[in-house]
Amino acid sequence: MIPDSFLPLFPAADKSSPLILAGPCAAESAGQTLDTARGLKRAGISIFRAGVWKPRTKPGGFEGMGAPALAWLAEVKAETGMATATEVANARHLAEAVEAGVDGVWIGARTSANPFAVQEIADAIALLPESIRESLTVLVKNPVNPDIELWIGALQRLARAGVRRLGAIHRGFSSYGKSIYRNPPLWRIPIELHRRIPALPLICDPSHIGGSRDLIAPLTQQALDMRFDGLIIESHCNPDQALSDAAQQITPAQISQILSGLEKPDIANTSTENLEALRREIDSIDDDLLELLARRMKVAREIGRLKHSLRMPVVQPGRYRSLIESRSESADRLGIAPEFIKTVLEAIHEESVRQQINLR
Ligand code: PEP
Ligand code: MN
């Protein structure tokens, strides 16, 4: 369904690794767009991003300047030689962006959650002249909800429409409640995407994951350490005055500073001499963990049989609460994050409940 190889993204831009797209959340005016692009060009960036149509949660906010802003992207390309990219959410956006000469488009997180919209864009791409479709880069942001199948489904729709320069952008997932992130990254999802489609280029969007300026540098380093192929970072010549996403935009000079401070892991280095012994140790600890879990499940099933004979309900909320509390305290003492242990225990508890219900 998804090809096992893809063509390089943004063929006209230089092939630096990691691939970096940067630019404002939105193209707000010709001046702001050009000013930001010039700064980014000086910072060595070769792919310019800017939103032209902005999906906003509530009506009445700044919804982007629309099609007239595409001319500013064309100016950026003509003046700086940078490749350009913008977000498209329907067939009309796609046609107008391609007509204006953009090198790439991305499908936003709200749109990739909607198969009708993705299919409409895919159908519009399928109708493009072959030479344009061949050179167009298409990036698919993860859907706002953490549903990897929906993300893969969107990628499949585009691959079937003939997109060969296809990539995925990880921008974190909507959540309810408090988090230091605007959109918690749930890294296991992009890792699973990479496992399922190894050749697909993966780009990290620290701006929308973090939602604040101080998180861009650490998230960027983390993405490189996790072998992402590229980054998309929001940058504005005057971030405090930005009409959307002001809190997470940084200046081109700040991007330059972040990039020069990054430690690039040496991907070519596959020497595993010192790693092997440690990996064997991890393998054997994992075996122990599995055995312990199996033992725990066996006891849980015995408890389940007992509860059943006593006509007690499977879930006992008081017991569950006190278990989570006491284990979180112990974890803290052992230097393990209580939040992490809570997630692990929740998964274990869910499985024991499932096994106890299966006995009935
Ligand atoms: C954006 O890139 O500016 C954007 C709107 O992102 P997302 O779709 O990830 O919210
Ligand atoms: Mn934005």
Image (cartoon, rainbow, N blue to C red):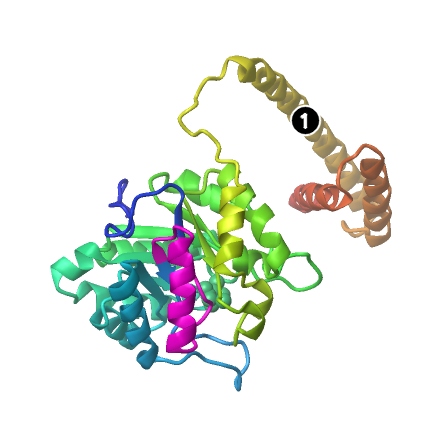
**Residue 349 or residue 193, whichever sits in front:** 193
Q: State whether residue 338 appears in this view.
A: yes
* Magenta residues (range): 21-47
Q: Residue at x 67, y 24 (%)?
A: 291
Count up the numbered dots: 1
Q: Specify the amino acid type for callout 1.
A: Leu
Residue 142 drawn above or below residue 328: below
Res. 3 image quadrant: top left
User: In terms of secondary structure, where does tag 1 sit?
Assistant: helix
Res. 118 image quadrant: bottom left
Give the percent coordinates (x, y) of residue 267.
43, 30
Judge from the rendering whether residue 248 lies leftward or rightward of residue 160; answer left or right: right
Asked if residue 274 lies in the magenta stretch, the reply is: no
Residue 49 drawn above or below residue 269: below
Give the percent coordinates (x, y) of residue 266.
45, 29
**Residue 27 or residue 323, whichever sits in front:** 27
**Residue 305 or residue 240, whichever sits in front:** 240
Q: Residue at x 17, y 61 (%)?
A: 132
Q: Badge 1: few (under 14), some or many (20 or more) residues near its Cα, within 10 Å? A: few
Give the percent coordinates (x, y) of residue 258.
53, 48
Give the percent coordinates (x, y) of residue 285.
66, 21
Q: Residue at x 55, y 46 (%)?
A: 187
Asked if residue 42 lies in the magenta stretch, the reply is: yes
Res. 71 image quadrant: bottom left
- Report the residue marked by disc 1: 289
Q: State whether residue 186 appears in this view.
A: no
Q: Residue at x 52, y 61 (%)?
A: 251
Residue 4 drawn above or below residue 64: above
